[in-house]
Image: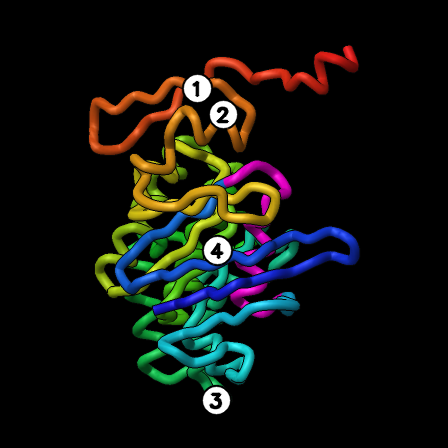
Amino acid sequence: MLSIRELGFGYKTIRALKNVGIDLNKGEVLSVVGPNGAGKTTLLKCIIRIVKPDKGTILIDGKDTSLMKRLALARCIGYVPQNSPSKFPITVFDAVLMGRRPYMSWKPCKKDLEIVAELLASMDLEDIALRDFDHLSGGQKQKVLLARAFAQDPVYLLLDEPTSNLDLRHQMEVMEMISEMVKKKGMAAILAMHDLNLASRFSDRIVMLNDGKIYCSGEPSLVMTAENIMSVYGVEVSINTDNSHPYILPIRPVISSKVKAQS
């Protein structure tokens, strides 16, 4: 289990996270949603130790991650940032092979190469294995970065806006890959998401952040309500519950009384 206890973090005078607590079990996909500035990306960066929390603890199977060496942490947690490198002069095969670095000494072994080859085949990337990463489309790049994270063989996967800037087809492909890999390998994933409908469809649980704090959490049907979305996003929505996943249809933004007074 990944356990986050009373996590706090601040950028100078801005408190980005305030007493955040989350438990994540293996086999789960958990989406973190909330408006811009709610603390989604900061939460992921704290977990992977890109930034250091100033309060709270993060535990993996009871072990404090702040006491773990970088190599040990890399074997437990894989991270896919929101933006792919703008210049990445390397082939697709070698980009995915980089995910094996926590396990390699001087050079890759036969097992490393086999893992990469299997991932490229299973993710339909074989045909572009020798292409330059820089020459790929946005959707292809995102799939390669996912493959690199899967090659790392982590127990926990952190993904920051994995569907940003992707067309509808690639959004579905990426989310289905994440969901399938989590179930297949018994991993767990935390996704920072803006798209509420994708989060609703592919998540086992959702945490809704607002102003650095957890506003609500639970199964999609409990979190994705018109009342919660109105309170956190300030948008009136209609919720379709005909299938097992709530579908959110935005109607109109709600102008606060403060904005009305200024106008």
Q: Position of residue 29 (x, y in %)?
A: 33, 52
At 32% from the left and 71% from the top, the residue drawn is 115
At 37% from the left and 64% from the top, the residue drawn is 150
Q: Quadrant of the N terminus?
A: bottom left
Quote the CA–CA distance across marks 3 and 4: 26 Å
- Give above or below for 97 relative to 261: below
Of pointers 2 and 1, the one earlier in the residue sequence = 2
Q: Which residue is mark 3?
A: 105
Judge left or right: residue 115 versus residue 144: left
What's under tag 1, amino acid-wise?
Answer: Val
What's under tag 4, amino acid-wise?
Answer: Arg
Quote the CA–CA distance across marks 4 and 1: 44 Å
Q: Which residue is mark 4?
A: 131
Judge left or right: residue 121 versus residue 213: left
Judge left or right: residue 121 versus residue 251: left
To which quarter of the image does residue 226 belong?
A: top left
Mark seen at residue 160: none
Quote the CA–CA distance across marks 1 and 3: 53 Å
At mark 3, the secondary structure is loop
Q: Nearer the viewer, mark 3 or mark 4?
A: 3
Of pointers 2 and 3, the one earlier in the residue sequence = 3
Of pointers 1 and 3, the one earlier in the residue sequence = 3
Q: Position of residue 54 (x, y in %)?
A: 65, 68
Can the viewer see residue 140?
Answer: no
